[in-house]
Amino acid sequence: MKKVFQTIWILSIALVAVRALAMTDEEKQEIIYASEAAPNHITDSASFLMFRDGKFQTIKEGNNKFTCLVIRNPHGRFEPACLNKPAIESVLPTLEYHMERLYSGASTKQVMDEITKKFEMNTLPSAKNGALVYMMSQNNKAYLEDAKKLISFPPHQMYFMPKLPVNVFSLEASTFSPGSPWVYQEYPHMTSLIVFTK
């Protein structure tokens, strides 16, 4: 029995090595980018996704409950992100839909209207309690839709929850400083509490 387990272990290590060798340079670079989002103890064992053909596709299987990827849009948004299991199940579907529609030429207003309808039809979930997204890269670039401007955005963590009133925590303003929380309402069917980090 011990030899059987040893054989299985050796085969699994070999399979991981083969998969690593099979990755393209583009996929390897995407993993480097996405790894900026969270501490090493998370990213070292995380799964990694890459956005291709309108969907996030797995490029590396991990063995913890985190999945890392890069959120982008046609205007230059660049936000490495690592999502825990509740966020993968309840936030990622919206992120993926948002990206797919923007890259297909839809406006942000169109996409948000569509997201509202899909949520009302129960085809997009709201955030599960406990949904966490790390975005701790020093290279975050966010696109301000109203100002049509790309800006550097501080490292932060996002705690998602079902839609709440904007003033529920009395945090309408943000100081963009470490430890400062900010309620962010990007999507019409969920709320996130952003905490800025060093």
Image (cartoon, rainbow, N blue to C red):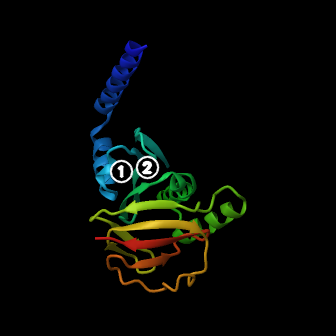
In this rendering, the answer to whether 62 lies above or below 105 is above
Q: Residue at 71%, 64% (x, y): give it.
A: 120
Residue at numbered disc 2: 66
Question: Residue pushed farthest front?
Answer: 2
**Neighbourhood count class around disc 1 (C-alpha, 10 Å): few under 14, some 14–19, many 20 upward:** some
Residue type at tag 1: Ile
Quarter of the view holding residue 125: bottom right
Image x and y of residue 12, in percent:
37, 25
Residue type at tag 2: Phe
The quadrant in which the C terminus is found is: bottom left
Residue at numbered disc 1: 42
In this rendering, the answer to whether 113 lies above or below 14 is below
In this rendering, the answer to whether 43 lies above or below 148 is above
Q: Return the residue nearer the eye: 158 or 101.
A: 158
**Neighbourhood count class around disc 2 (C-alpha, 10 Å): few under 14, some 14–19, many 20 upward:** many
Q: Residue at 54%, 54% (x, y): give it.
A: 86
Element at label 2: loop
Left or right for 185, reference 34:
right
Q: Return the residue nearer the eye: 118 or 90.
A: 90
- Marking on residue 137: none
Question: In the rendered image, is residue 177 in sight?
Answer: yes
Q: Are marks 2 and 1 in contact (CB under 8 Å)?
A: yes
Quarter of the view holding residue 188: bottom right
The quadrant in which the N terminus is found is: top left
Image x and y of residue 173, in percent:
44, 86
Marks 2/1: CA distance? 7 Å
Disc nearer the start of the sequence (2/1): 1
